[in-house]
Image: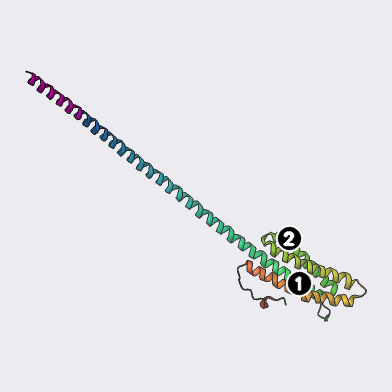
Amino acid sequence: MENFIAQVLASATVSTALSAILVWLTKTWISERLRGSIKSEYDQRLEAHKAQLKAQSDVEIEKLRSQLSISAAEHQVRFANLHEKRAEVIATTYSLLRELFNYLRDYIKIYETDRDQPKEQRREVTIGAIKKFRDYVEPHIIFLPANTAEKLNNIDAQLVNAFNEFVIKVERGRDAGDNWLAIVKRVGTEIPPAMRDLENEFRRILGESEPDIKAIAPN
């Protein structure tokens, strides 16, 4: 009898142990399945989120590229228009400057011929050239670089000073001989190099790298 009871108890103990193991295995399996399901769903959502972020990033990059392209095109147009306007200003300024220089040189020349206009008339022509030059340059000088504008203003001052000095010291002065020669010499030797330098500056602005200095000397 005792042996039977012992066998029953042993069998019950084994059954309990097996049940406990089975319950543990079941819980473990369910837990792993649940964890795997959660991880799979998380991975799917993560990939979807990454794909969404990449799509949004690609859209923003394309927008930026488009904006940069439009900005570059607008800048190119503005630069082309500025360069065209600057070329126009340089051409007109240089033409008026050469005109002024030639009129002044003709006005103060020592040797005259029968074909020359009277000095008084040449003086008025020179005054008109000075006014015409300054009236144009003053509102357009902003199109020139500061260094170029300074060179232009210096030449303008030299020409006007020579004109005023000739009027005061030669036409209205008593001892005109020496002053006349000095003014003619200064206009003929100091201003041409300054004008050549300015011409080279103009050519550099317009894009020429190696200006021919000899070819652009004042006549």
Which residue lies at the image location 92% right of the left edge and 75% below the top edge? 175
- Residue 21: where, in percent of width, then height? 20, 29
* Residue 138 badge: 2
Q: Is residue 34 left or right of residue 161?
A: left
Q: Secondary structure beneath disc 1? A: helix
Question: Residue type at mark 2?
Answer: Glu
In this orientation, which residue lies closer to the viewer: 24 or 145? 24
Q: Write the start and end of the magenta stretch as one range.
A: 1-21
Which quarter of the image is occupied by the C terminus? bottom right
Q: Is residue 92 left or right of residue 24?
A: right
89, above or below 185, in the image: above
- Residue 208: where, in percent of width, then height? 61, 70
Mark 2 → mark 1, Cα distance in angstroms: 18 Å
Q: Secondary structure beneath disc 2? A: helix
Q: Quadrant of residue 194?
A: bottom right
Question: Residue type at mark 1?
Answer: Phe
Which residue lies at the image location 72% right of the left edge and 68% below the top edge? 96
Which quarter of the image is occupied by the N terminus? top left
Q: Is residue 10 left or right of residue 47?
A: left
Which residue lies at the image location 63% right of the left edge and 62% below the top edge? 85
- Residue 147: where, in percent of width, then height? 69, 64
* Mark 1, residue position: 101
17, above or below 186, in the image: above
Q: Is residue 4 magenta?
A: yes
Q: Is residue 108 left or right of residue 50?
A: right
